Image: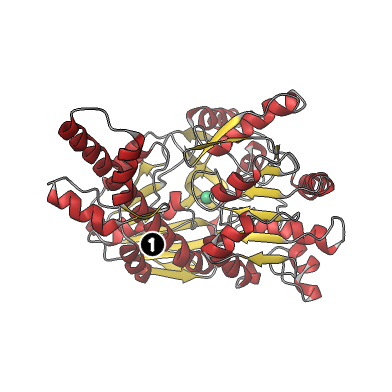
Amino acid sequence: MECQFLGAAGEVTGSMHLLDAGKDQILMDCGMFQGRRKQSDEKNRQFPVDPAKISSMVLSHAHIDHSGRIPVLTRSGFSGRIITTRPTLNALNYMLLDSGHIQESDAQYLNYKSLRAFLFQEEQKKRNKQLSGSEKSKIKRLLKKNPHELDPDTITRLQQQHGLGRIVPLYTMEQARQSLSFIDGYPYDHRISIGHHTTVKFYVAGHILGSAFSLITVKDGKRTKRILYTGDVGRFNKPIIKDPTLIFDEQDRDIDLMIMESTYGDREHAPVKDLGKSMKKVLLETFNRGGSLIIPSFAFGRTQELIYVLHELYKNNEVPGQPIYVDSPLASNITRVFGEHPETYDKETHAAFLEKGLNPFYFDKVRFVQSVEESMALTREQAPHVVISASGMCEAGRILHHLRYKIHNPKNTILMVGYMAEHTLGRRLQELGAQAAENNNAQHPPEVKILGKSYPLAARVENIDGFSAHGDKHELDKLVTESNLNIGKIAIVHGEASQSSAFARHLEQKGHDVFIPAFGDAIAV
Ligand SMILES: [Zn+2]
């Protein structure tokens, strides 16, 4: 029996591992590669094993870097079942459709761009001179229904007319919808048969709603082997969901191979208990200036934690009760899924909310914005408020419009609550904001480009970093050393090289048998 590493090996995205147990070929996660567009796109389109040979799949949680290639698997000959927890299944109903939608719009935009370049060139040849701005605009208008919406029918027609190749999406919304029928949701702590000799049991991973450690047991004749795949490991003492499991059932304690994430294998997070305090400070400063708070946030997990922390501050009258708007249809849907799974909440959430008859995510100051019209009206709202919107790194989505309308006003605050990857607008705002603060905001505000136009960054930029959904090095260590597991080998995955190797060194010093697989590496179990 062996385990092969086919994604998130030496990097943080594209999680996928294959357990080859003879008749049972079990895939663990089927995540999308993210990052530089061209490179990730190529990796996402080449499925590394024949989907028809996989007998079943186990999914750790609904984040797209773990689940996003499920529609590729299911449309390419896979005929098994995908096993996950119930909350994850419910969340996938929205996450995978949203991903299909993003794939379609990305492909549409790339088709538009290549056709536009082709038409510019043709027109230039015809006129034998560079095109003016207005001549270019005329061509752009031809390909759009209105300034913000492309015209796919015209784009397709012209591409065909000129014999140009078309970019097809990785998968469509319809293919994402079809993939949902392959997925079954089960409760935690139950043994589920997933093959001839193989079972899986899910333990709480504390990372996001529905996230699980997958304990896979293979019984082949007299031999029993256990693989524990952590997926993403959460933090301890975070609001809402239960902490990562440390106590495993007696018969599950001996682990032959643990496949473990290491995103923050070499980092320490700010303590969780300061989240409310930090949030209160930012809110009071902003409201005292008469400004609004803009929070770019991931739709799944981060948004619900923000609502939870705000709800606590509001219900204890610690801050003025200005309205809170959640302006992301995906975040609104995922918040509903949170509301449907109180069995996954921790004791504190039960005590602070449920036992008092309160829902953590719905209270009179929160409004969930649905339509584009409503969202556009909100961008022009002058009275102080809080807006939580996606995307989390300010790369796309409604957050861009809130920034466009509010970034020039020094009364406002842009609050960063997550990791901003390099080359994203979020990272740029963070860096420029830090520079401005160093100069006490005395200098001329720096310019930032949003949707092709320049805006002065006069709003404050603040950061609260305790919201991470991943355990830091101490929390990862805690799972290995403070749990009741007896662990054989540990494969370190899901981390950049520096983080994985630091964490591996740390575990080696404690006497563990550790290795860091590269893409395609396999290990005997
Ligand atoms: Zn995750």
Residue kind at label 1, given as amino acid type: Thr
Q: In the figure, is residue 50 to the left or right of 246? A: left
Query: Would you identify the image quadrant in which residue 523 lies?
Result: top left
Q: In the figure, is residue 1 to the left or right of 234? A: left
* Residue at x 31% of width, y 64% of height: 175
Residue 250 visible in image: no
Of 192 and 455, the residue lying toward us: 455
Of 302 and 445, the residue lying toward us: 445
Q: Position of residue 63 (x, y in %)?
A: 49, 54
Residue 464 visible in image: yes
Quadrant for the C terminus in the image = top left
- The residue that disc 1 covers is 198
Of 468 and 441, the residue lying toward us: 441
Q: In the figure, is residue 38 to the left or right of 34? A: left
Mark 1 neighbour density, 10 Å: few (under 14) some (14–19) many (20 or more): many
Where disc 1 sits, the SS reads strand
Q: Position of residue 248 (x, y in %)?
A: 60, 57
* Residue at x 44% of width, y 42% of height: 13
Q: How many labels sit on residues?
A: 1
Colour scheme shown: secondary structure
Query: Would you identify the image quadrant in which residue 341 lies?
Result: bottom right
Q: Position of residue 347 (x, y in %)?
A: 75, 64
Seen in the picture, residue 355 relative to 170 is either above or below; the reply is below
* Residue at x 35% of width, y 71% of height: 181
User: Which residue is situated farthest in the bottom direction here?
Assistant: 357
Q: Position of residue 160 (x, y in %)?
A: 15, 52
Seen in the picture, residue 277 relative to 36 is either above or below; the reply is below
User: Which residue is situated farthest in the right direction here?
Assistant: 317
